Image (cartoon, grey):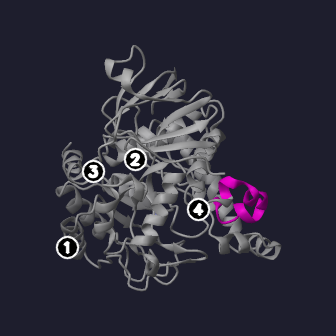
Amino acid sequence: MRPTRLWALLLAATTALPAAAAPVLLENARVFDGTRDRGITPVLIDNGRIVHVGTPLPAAASGARRIDYTGKTVLPGLVNAHAHVGNTQGLEHGDRFYTRDNVVRDLRQFQRYGITTVTALGMNGEAFFAIRKAVNASPALGAQLYGAGGGIGVPGGTPPAAAMGLSRDPVARPRTAEEARAAVATQHADGVDLVKLWVDNAGGKLPLMAPEVYQAAIAEAHARGLKVAAHIHDLAQARDLVAARVDIIAHGIRDTTIDPMLARTMREQGTGYIPTLAIDEANYAYAESPQLLDTPFVRNALPADVLARWSQPTWQQQQLAGANIPAARKAVAMNLQNVGRLSAAGVKLGFGTDAGALPQRVIGVAEHRELQLLVQAGLTPAQALQTATTNAADLLGLDDRGRIAAGKRADLLVVDGDPLADISTTQRIHAVWQAGEAVAGPLE
Ligand SMILES: [Zn+2]
C-alpha cells in the first residue's frame, strides 16, 4: 500500500541506530514476541537490533555478554499511537510548555515506563521537527518520537484553544475544503508523520468540523501518502469519518453502543481503533483511590506539586463532586463495552492514552492502566499486549518494531513475573532497552 511505503522511506531517513559495543544475550526469560508466548527462550541482540530468538543459538552468541532474566518476561517496548509531549508543567498545561527540555523530559518518562515509541498526536510546536531528529538518533533522549505537527482543528472549536492553554495555537483551523487541503500540504511539507483531525463538538457546545472540510483533508493526506487519525467522542462522527476512509479513530466511541454494521465496515476497510479507555477514568481515579499515590509506580511519575495537591482530602472531595464526573463514569463504561464489541468483531485495535495532554493523564501510568482496562473490556492479556506492541506499530506503519524477531529494533520492556497470567505484572518494571541499550531499570 502506497502510504505505508512512503512512511517507511520517511522513517529510513530519521531512525539511524547508534552502534552498540558487543552482542548481548538475554537468557532464561519468558518471551512474549508481540503476538504469542514463546516460553523461556534466549534473545540475542547486536548493533541495536534483535538478531536471533530461540535455540539453537548462532555462533555469534558465544562471545556475547550474558544477562540472566530468570523469573522475568521480555516484551517488545510498548508503542503509544496517541499521546502528547511538552504540554504540561506540574499542575498546568498549555503550548507555552513546548520546549525541547520538556519534550525530552516527557519522552524519558515514557521510556522509564517501558513505552519506547510515542506518537505525539497534535498540538506540537514548531520545535517538533528538530526535536524528533535529535531524539530518534539517541536512546538517551527517551522514547522515539513521531507526530502530527500541530494537527487540524476547527475555528472556535476543538481543540478549544482557551481550555487547552493554546496561546500561540499551533493547530491549523481551516474553514473550507480548500483551506483544509492547503493545511495538509503545509504539514506534509513540514514533515509530519501523519495528519490529526479533531471532529468533536463537545456535546453540542462547540462548532463541529464540516464534512467537506474533513473529507478534503483526508483525500489530500491520502494523495500525499499520509495516514489520518481523527479525534472523536461520538458514534455519528466516527461513522462519517469511516465513510470518508479515515485510517485511525483515535478515541473510543463513548456516547452510545456501536452498531455491527460500522464494526464490519471498519474491519473490511482496515480502520484502526484506539480506545483511550484510561482518559475519562483519570478524571476521578486518583481522587477516588488516593492509595495509588503511595505506590512507587504512580509516585515516581508525578511532579511534586501534583503529588502534593492530589494528596489533599479537600482536593479529592472536590474532584469527586465535579459536575463532569457522572458523565466520565458513563463514558468509561460505554468505551469498555464498545472496545469489547469491536475486538470481538475483528476490528484492528491500536494503543494510545492521550497521556501528556493534561496533568491527570499521567505519562507511563496511563499506558499500564490502559492494558488493565483492555483486559477488563474482554481482551486476553496476550491480546492486550499485542494491541500495545505489534498492532500499534503496524497501525503506524512502523514495521521495524513492536515485535521480538530477528531484524527488529531491540526496544524491550522486561518485567518481573508473567503478564500473560496477570496483566498488572507489566507495572513491575525491571528494565527497559532501547536500540540495544539498557536505558532504565526498576522504578523504586
Ligand atoms: Zn489527544
Instruction: Depth check: give the residue in front, 229 or 72.
Output: 72
Q: In the image, is 296 to the left or to the right of 248?
A: right
First in sequence: mark 2 vs mark 1? 1
Is 416 rendered above or below residue 7? Answer: above
Label 2: which secondary element: strand
Q: Is residue 201 left or right of residue 394?
A: right
Q: Which residue is mark 2?
A: 272
Kindly indicate whether the residue at mark 4 contacts the one at mark 1 (C-beta within 8 angstroms). Answer: no
Q: Assess disc 3: are there few (<14), some (14-19) or many (≥20) residues with their C-alpha within 10 Å of its C-alpha.
A: some
Q: Nearer the viewer, mark 1 or mark 4?
A: 4
Q: CA distance from mark 3 to mark 2?
A: 24 Å
Foreground residue among 167 and 415: 415
- Residue type pointed to by label 2: Gly
Answer whether residue 294 is magenta in the image.
yes
Does label 4 point to a residue whose CB lies under 8 Å from ligand 1?
A: no
Amino acid type, mark 1: Ala
Query: What predominant SS class does the magenta segment belong to?
Result: helix
Q: In 3D space, how far apart are the residues under numbered discs 4 and 3 (Cα atoms)?
A: 27 Å
What's the CA distance linking mark 2 and mark 1? 25 Å
